[in-house]
Amino acid sequence: MEDRENKDRAARDAAWAKPVDRLRVSGVPDGALNLNVEGRQLTGPLRGFGKMWQKTYRVRLDGVEATPQEVIAAWKENFSKFWPEGNAFYGPLTGIAPGEVAVLNLSMPGRIPLSTGVMVIFADEESFTFMTPQGHMLAAWITFSAFEEDDTKVVQVQALLRATDPLSEIGLRLFGHKSEDEFWRHTLKALAAHFGVTASVEQQVTCVDPRLQWSQAGNIWHSAALRTPLYAPVHWLRRMIRRS
Amino acid sequence: MPQSQVKMDVRKVTPQASVIDIEGDVTAFSENVLMDAYTDASSDGANSIILNFSNLDYMNSSGIGLLVTLLIRAQRQGQSLLAYGLSDHYRQIFELTRLNEAISCYAGEADAVAAASNGR
C-alpha cells in the first residue's frame, strides 16, 4: 500500500521539470529560425514589466466521448497543427514533456518574423504548462488543460502574463491582446474541430495587477521582437555558407 | 468541475502574522478555499501571511498560478507572503517558477514567524 503511494507520488512529482539556469535547445529542424532561446533564462510573470493579466479561453466539447486524458494526448501530439497559419512550434522529438524546450517561429504584424521559445515546466495526463524565456514578448505561464464539467469535456487555455518590457507593453496594448485572443481562439476551435465539434470559445480576462514593474524595464535588452529582425539575416547567411 | 481536495485552516500567531495551514492538493480547484483562507487571515489586519506547506500532498502548475495571484493580492494590500514546510521537491518548483524570489521560504514555523516579526 505504502509502496503504491510512493509510486503515485513519484509519478506526480515527475510531472514537473527540474530547475534550470539556462535553456538548452536540441533537435530543431533545419528550416527553423533558432534564435533567442539557447542560453536564455526562464522569466515567467513575476519577472515581467507590464500589467499582469489572467486570460482564460475555454471550449466545450459537447457530445465527445474521449476522456480528458485522451483530449490532452491528442493536443500534445498535434500541438502546432492547431495553431494559426504562419506560426510554427518546433518541439523536441520526445514531445511535450517536462523540461523540454521548444523553439517558436511566430508571424508578427507586418509579417515580421519572430523567433523565441518556451519550456515545458509541467506536463501530466490532464494538463501541461509552458513558461517563457527572456526575450519572449510575454513573461508568462500558459496552462493547457482538459476536464469534465456538467458531463461535458471542457478544454481550456489559461495564461498568466505580463508584457516582458516597455516595448512589448505598448505592442500588447495596441494590437497584442487582440492578436493573442485570436491566436488561442483559433487554436481551441481547431482542437474542437479535430474532435468533430464546431464550438464557440468563451473568454474571461482579469487584470490581476495594474502596476508596471519599472525594475524590469531592462528586459528590453533581450527582446526577441528587436533581435530577430536584426539577427535573422546573419542566421540565414551562415546557413547558406555552411550548405555551400 | 472536480471538487477541491484541500483543507486550509487559519491561525493567528502574532498580532501581525497569520498562518494558513494547507492540507491536501493545491490545484485550480482550490481557488475559493485559498482566497477565503487569505481573507480570514487578513481580517485582523495581519501584515504577514505565512503559508504552512507541511501537509501539502500535491501541487500542480495551476496551483502555482494561484500562489502568484495570492502574492499579488497580498502585495497590493502591503502584506508580505512567507512559506515554510516545503519539501525539497516543492522548493525546487519554487526555484523553477521564480516564486522563491517573491515568497521567502523557511524551514519551520518559528523561523517564518521570526522573519515576519522582523518585517522581512
Image (cartoon, rainbow, N blue to C red):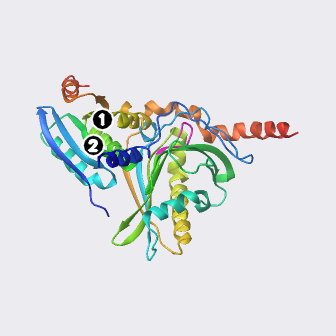
Q: Where residue A218 sits in the image (x, y, percent)?
A: 52, 30
Local secondary structure at mark 1: loop
Q: As drawn, which residue projects farthest toward the right?
A: A244
Chain under label 2? B
Picture residue at 59% right of the left edge, 48% below the top? A94
**Residue nearest the observer in this picture, A144 or A183:** A144
Q: Amino acid at mark 2?
A: Leu
Query: Which residue position is annotated with label 1?
Result: B86
Query: Which quarter of the figure is the C terminus of chain A placed in?
Result: top right
Residue A70 sits above or below residue B106 on the image:
below
Are callouts 2 and 1 both on one chain? yes
Quarter of the image for residue A102 reads top right
Q: Amino acid at mark 1?
A: Leu
- The magenta-colored residue range is A133-140
Disc 2, disc 1: CB below 8 Å? Answer: yes
CA gap between label 2 and label 1 equals 8 Å
Picture residue at 22% right of the left edge, 36% below the top? B49
Residue B56's disc number? 2
Residue A142 sits above or below residue A182 on the image:
above
| A100 with respect to A201 (left or right) | right
Q: Where residue A211 sits in the image (x, y, percent)?
A: 38, 40
| B81 with respect to A220 (left or right) | left
